Every structure is written in C-alpha cells, then in structure tokens.
Image: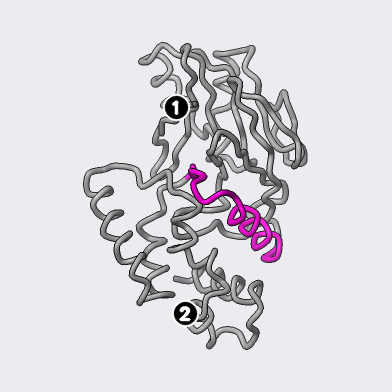
Amino acid sequence: MLNIKSIPAFNDNYIWLIENSDQRCAVVDPGDAAPVLAYLERHQLSLEAILITHHHNDHIGGVSELVRQFPNVDVVGPANEPIPTLTHAVDPGEQIELFDEVFLVLGLEGHTAGHIGYVGDGKLFCGDVLFSAGCGRVFEGTMEQMYTSLSKLAALPQETEVFCAHEYTASNVAFALAVEPDNAQLHKYRDEVNRLRAQNQPTLPTTIGREKWINPFLRTDQPSVMRSVANRTSQTDPLAIFTALREWKNEF
C-alpha cells in the first residue's frame, strides 16, 4: 500500500508525493522543484520517478531541476505532448510499475491534446481533468474529448481515491450549488469543505463515488442538472448538457 502526501505549490497546486516503505518516492506533476526538494530533504527520501499528466508549466516547471539533483530519476509522461525531459514516454493503455504496484495509463484528452492519468493501488492521479465538484477547462481538445475522459473516470470503482492537481473545491462547490441548489449531499459537502479550508487542510483526495453524488459534470444525465441548463441548450443528450455546463462554468 502506497502512502500519498500533498506538497502545496504556487497558489493552489498540489504536487502529489507517492512514498513506499523504504524511503523511496515518486512525485506527480512537480510544477516547482523547491517545495519538493525541501520535503525530500526533511524526510530523507530518494526520488525514483516523476509522473507527468500534461505539459502545462505549473505541472512540469520543476522537472528539470529535479532531474539535475536526481540524474537517475525516471521521468514518465505522455508520448504526444511537448515535454523535453521525458525518459519514459507512455501511451494510453500502457502500464507502468511503481514500487511493486501496477498503474494503468489512461488517455484523458480535452484539457490538453495528450493529457493522461494514472490509476493503480485504488488511486487515480488525473491532473487537470477531474476536480472535486468540477472539471478542467477545455483548452486544446474538444468538449467531446473532455466528456469522454470524464465518463472513463466515472466508470472506475466508486472507492477509487482521486488525487487532482488543484485546490479548486470551494469555488467548484459554489458553482455546483448554482446547478443543483436542492442537492442535499452537496450542502453537506460544502460544510465539510468550508471546515477543512478554514483549518488550511486539503479537501483532497476525493473519491469517484462521492463525485458522482456532488459533481455536476458527472451528473449530466440527472433531471436536476438538465433542468438547470435548459435555458442554455435545447438538446438533452449528455454531451450537449456537459457542453452547456462547461460554458456556464467558464463565465461563472
């Protein structure tokens, strides 16, 4: 069983640190090297691998410095994105081994053209695709790709822990409540999120099961969600509902 720790970076990023039982570790999406190096030194850990989900600078900005400090580190990332430091390019459907656990590489296009995620040991590292109570913006891909990627994630086991890369939960919950003001689970979750943030605690990881109850982007087939975008689209298929939701969130 792997141990996961969050290393805060910038205003609202999380660099996830995956630790095994003998002082070896991996990090996911290190946008900044400094907090990672400080953590490794404080806990006397050796960095064996870096997992990258996509090419945005707040996810890869620290990689070159980490490689400088740990020249033998394995840098794993999406084969079809422009990431100069990769030592191990992976495509969707491939598997990687990390501290005796096998992780499957998922194709999660939409936010960027070649965005990937890693799922294994009951854990999902999904970068900027699924957030708690929200989802990533569609920058390079299409709405259809993003919807497909989220549908893949929704099909994972309910208890899968979701480690996304940003602390956006409070603002996402505000939007989700605008979409589903009568969702009792969401009201309960808002109170929990407010309590955690007041104590400066992360709201993550979340779980797939929880997100299916509270995340409007995973609830496009629910009458309550469909009603809330009825003034934005005349279509009722899930992709049209998702597109209307995402466009509403962009301006929210």
- Answer with the quarter of the image where residue 64 lies: top right
**Start-end of magenta stretch:** 142-165
The kind of residue on which mark 2 rests is Ser
Relative to residue 224, is residue 118 depicted above or below?
A: above
Q: Residues within 10 Å of mark 1 (few under 14, many from 20)?
A: few
Q: As drawn, is 72 to the left or to the right of 29?
A: right
Residue drawn 58% across the image and 20% down it: 99
Relative to residue 193, is residue 15 depicted above or below?
A: above
The kind of residue on which mark 1 rests is Asn
Which residue, given by chain and number where applicable, does mark 1 sit on?
3
Could you tell me which quadrant the C terminus lies in?
bottom left
Residue drawn 76% across the image and 40% down it: 93
Task: Tell me the SS state at disc 2.
Answer: helix
Q: Which of marks 1 and 2 precedes in the sequence?
A: 1
Residue drawn 45% across the image and 14% down it: 45
Give me the C-alpha separation between circle 2 and circle 1.
Answer: 38 Å
Task: Tell me the SS state at disc 1.
Answer: strand
Q: Residues within 10 Å of mark 2 (few under 14, many from 20)?
A: some
Using the image, tell me which numbered label, if any, was put on residue 224. Answer: 2
- Answer with the quarter of the image where residue 152 lies: bottom right
